[in-house]
């Protein structure tokens, strides 16, 4: 109930208010609750949609770390209900990272080991349940790779090239089967050019 009340309150708080930083701190603390059923991660996603929030949020202490932890929560789910909630958290947090990556000034800041671990994990999720998360992770990586100085670190990160190669294969299979790129998530096929840009950077 406290988490639900917090997120309802959060809807009314903007970056221009003096309580903005306190809100982010409260959301970070609330994210540690594993029974929030995606409510807190959804609020991170909603707040990062706003362009004016993105630089501030990317620089807020422990926020990127929290998003990464939410992405990786699917590894620890032990029951079907926990897995469903973890997948929702992972999807919301990955979308939030992708929103932050839409801001060029954030590209170097968010290219750290925790975020890369989260995005490699998200881009590697199997099955229909992970489809939206996979696309969001590839989108975030593609945006981060626009900063050329990020590419060597990204290319050398464990599992990175394998996960993007798998995404490239999925996209090629969709194309061969005549499935439009925008049919599911509305996202163009980004994996192949991303893979090529990282291979060149090695």
Image (tube, rainbow, N blue to C red):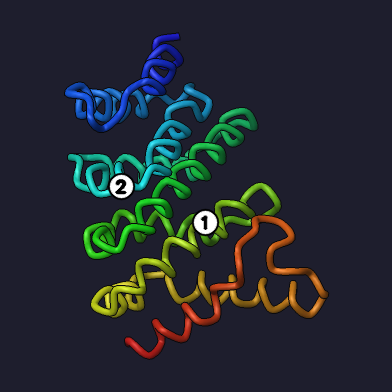
User: Helix, strand, or loop for circle 2?
Assistant: helix
User: What is the number of the mark on residue 54?
Assistant: 2
Q: In this view, does 134 lie to the left or right of 140?
A: right
Q: Count neighbours of disc 1 (C-alpha within 10 A) and say few if under 14, some if 14 to 19, many if 20 or more.
A: many
The quadrant holding residue 119 is: bottom left
The N terminus sits in image quarter:
top left
**Which residue of the protein is positioned furthest toward the right in this rendering?**
177
The quadrant holding residue 44 is: top left
Instruction: Name the residue: 64% across, 32% down.
Output: 80
Residue beneath label 1, please?
A: 136
Q: Is residue 47 left or right of residue 170?
A: left
**Which residue of the protein is positioned furthest toward the bottom in this rendering?**
200
Instruction: Name the residue: 23% across, 30% down.
Output: 16
The C terminus sits in image quarter:
bottom left
Looking at the image, is mark 1 or mark 2 nearer the viewer?
A: 2
Instruction: Name the residue: 33% across, 55% down.
Output: 115
Q: x%, y% of residue 188?
A: 61, 69
Q: How far apart are marks 1 and 2 (CA)?
A: 16 Å
Q: Count neighbours of disc 2 (C-alpha within 10 A) and say few if under 14, some if 14 to 19, many if 20 or more.
A: many
Can residue 20 be seen from the camera position used here? yes
The quadrant holding residue 148 is: bottom left
Can residue 74 be seen from the camera position used here? no
Instruction: Name the residue: 67% across, 71% down.
Output: 170
Q: x%, y% of residue 198?
A: 39, 82
Mark 1 vs mark 2: which is more N-terminal? 2
User: What is the number of the mark on residue 107?
Assistant: none
User: Helix, strand, or loop for circle 1?
Assistant: helix
Q: In this view, does 201 lie to the left or right of 4?
A: left
Q: x%, y% of residue 142?
A: 44, 70
**Which residue of the protein is positioned furthest toward the top in this rendering?**
1
């Amino acid at each position: 109930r406290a988490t639900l009340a917090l997120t309802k309150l959060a809807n009314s708080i903007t970056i221009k208010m003096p309580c903005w930083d306190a809100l982010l701190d409260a959301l970070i603390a609330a994210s540690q609750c594993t029974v929030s059923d995606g409510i807190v991660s959804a609020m991170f996603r909603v707040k990062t949609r706003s362009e004016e929030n993105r630089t501030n949020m990317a620089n807020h202490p422990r926020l990127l770390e929290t998003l990464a932890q939410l992405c990786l929560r699917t590894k620890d789910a032990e029951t079907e209900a926990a897995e469903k909630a973890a997948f929702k958290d992972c999807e919301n947090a990955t979308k939030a990272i992708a929103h932050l990556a839409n801001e060029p000034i954030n590209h170097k800041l968010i290219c750290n080991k925790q975020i890369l671990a989260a995005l490699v994990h998200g881009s590697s999720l199997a099955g229909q349940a992970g489809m939206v998360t996979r696309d969001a992770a590839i989108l975030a990586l593609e945006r981060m790779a626009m900063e050329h100085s990020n590419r060597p670190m990204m290319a050398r990160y464990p599992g990175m090239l394998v996960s993007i190669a798998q995404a490239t294969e999925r996209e090629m299979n969709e194309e061969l089967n005549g499935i439009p790129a925008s049919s599911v998530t509305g996202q163009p096929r980004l994996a192949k050019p991303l893979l090529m840009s990282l291979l060149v950077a090695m």
